[in-house]
Image: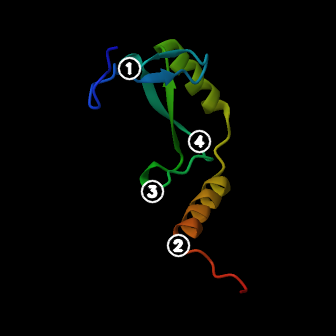
Amino acid sequence: MWKRGKHARRPSTPALELCDLCARTFPADEAVTGHVADSSSVHPTRDRYDGLRRVTACCEAHLGVIREAYGRRPFVQEELWAGKIARVMASGPPVVGME
């Protein structure tokens, strides 16, 4: 019986992306990406990207529909600040309990 060696290469599967509009999967090199304004989006480490959400689409038409949908949503500054405060509070050392 034939055995594969310990360090034999396995066939690699290409990375897949998912369209945020139609949920179709496609190869990552075909992805159309962009950023939209979203007050509920807070980056975990870089405050430069706070208020921006990265969206992925399978084509330019779907990216346009996604941008249009996010353009109709209100941008609430208080929601963005709440997310920033939550990130800072979670980044510190854990709180010591009563014990």
Of the numbered discs 1 and 3, the one sitting upstream in the chain is 1
Q: Which residue is mark 4?
A: 38
Give the label, 4 or 3, closer to the camera. 3
Q: Which residue is mark 2?
A: 92
Of the numbered discs 4 and 1, the one sitting upstream in the chain is 1
Of the numbered discs 4 and 2, the one sitting upstream in the chain is 4
Of the numbered discs 2 and 3, the one sitting upstream in the chain is 3
Classify residue 6 as left or right of residue 72.
left
List x then y, in percent, for residue 48: 42, 53
As shown in the figure, which amino acid type bears the numbered disc 3?
Thr
Q: How far apart, in angstroms, are the residues tagged by discs 4 and 3?
A: 17 Å
The dot on residue 29 is: none
List x then y, in percent, for residue 13: 39, 20
Residue farthest to the right? Answer: 98
Q: Residue at x 61, y 16 (%)?
A: 22
Q: Residue at x 54, y 16 (%)?
A: 62
Q: How far apart, in angstroms, are the residues tagged by discs 2 and 3?
A: 13 Å
Pointers 4 and 2 in contact (C-beta within 8 Å): no
Give the label, 2 or 1, closer to the camera. 1
Q: Which residue is mark 1?
A: 14
Classed neighbour count for the residue bearing mark 2: other residues with Cα under 10 Å, few (<14), some (14–19), many (≥20): few
Residue farthest to the front? Answer: 1
As shown in the figure, which amino acid type bears the numbered disc 4?
Asp
Q: Quadrant of the C terminus?
A: bottom right
Circle 2 SS class: loop
Q: How far apart, in angstroms, are the residues tagged by discs 4 and 1?
A: 30 Å
As shown in the figure, which amino acid type bears the numbered disc 1?
Pro
Pointers 1 and 3 in contact (C-beta within 8 Å): no
